[in-house]
Image: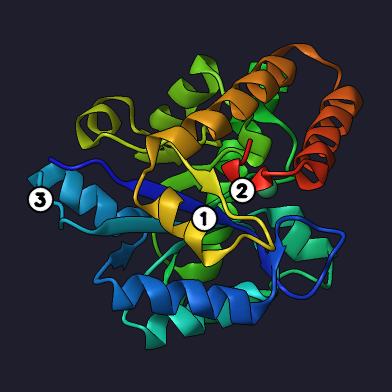
Amino acid sequence: MSRFVTLMYHNLEQDPANRYSLPVEAFEQQVAWLRAEGYVIEGFPDLEVRLARGLFPERYVVMTFDDGHRSNLRAAEILSRAGAQATFFLTRDFCRYNLAFLRDDEIRQLAALCSVGSHGLTHTPLSRLDAVHAWAELAESKAWLEDITGSPVTTMSAPGGFINHTVLRQARDLGYTLVGNSVEWWNEPSTVNIERLVNRVAIWQGMPLSLFARIVRHDARYLRARRLRAGALGLARRTLPLHLYHGLSRALYRLRQALPGRQLGW
Ligand SMILES: [Zn+2]
């Protein structure tokens, strides 16, 4: 069985201040490149089927979007036209209280094109919550999305990548069968099959297509550099107060942007 990469996107709009926001054209270019190169692009439910059968195409990539920004509907339309799939992980309170995020009817449109999963109630880091509150985040966000779409929700991604064994066990107990994290590494199907955790590599704005290609082709040198950065952040994620952690994450990003030879990536 072959290793594969899962991509993590957020918004599709012009927003230079937000590294996670890609112009629509950049996303279209990436999808077109993947299709031209013969990649099969799928979401978590298709991955689940492949894990059960042990059958993976030579060129395979899993696509995910986090948070539920309104531009996600555009992404789903682009993917649908390209014969591709993705899973969109939605945060309930973003969608409920922020006009920049998907409304109920848009979530239904999204779910008709692609698959949807939970990204918590409030986007609070789950591993920082006590068991009762973590359970509520996982259970109530699932119920909310099932109520809107009328279909079972069995996948989720961890807000900010904050996940630990307790939360993972709770997720399994609640019926989540696959959980996306923010570990920037490729996936081995045999490992995902056991752990039910999917590593995901964030796609940032301004990333040249050549670098995007290295990620999709699970280039070890590049991903190792990304993993080092993620490893440092992972330690900070477990230990630092949240405001310090977010400050460190932003500082690392700015440093990466400022350094010559930044294409090697961090
Ligand atoms: Zn998020």
Label 3 CB less than 8 angstroms from ligand 1: no
Expressed as whole percent of the image width and height from the top left, the position of residue 115 reads: 42, 65
- Tell me whether the residue at label 1 lies in contact with that at label 2, contact meaning CB atoms closer than 8 angstroms: yes
- Helix, strand or loop for disc 2: helix
- The amino acid sitting under disc 1 is Leu
Pick whichever of labels 2 and 3 is earlier in the sequence: 3
- Helix, strand or loop at label 1? It is helix
Crowding at dot 3, Cα within 10 Å, few <14 / some 14-19 / many 20+, comes out as few
Quarter where residue 51 is shown: top left
Query: Percent from the top left, x then y, of residue 197?
Result: 40, 32
Determine whether the beta carbon of the residue marked 1 sits less than 8 angstroms from the nearest atom of ligand 1. Answer: no
**In the rendered structure, which amino acid carries the disc numbered 3?**
Leu
The answer to whether residue 173 is left or right of residue 2 is right
Tag 2: amino acid: Gln
Q: Residue beneath label 2, please? A: 263
- Which residue corresponds to mark 3? 55
In the drawing, does residue 54 fall left or right of residue 94?
left
Q: Which residue is mark 1?
A: 211
Please determine whether, in this image, residue 35 is positioned above or below residue 164.
below
Which residue shows up at 15% across the image and 57% down it? Answer: 57
Rendered residue at 58%/41% (across/down): 264
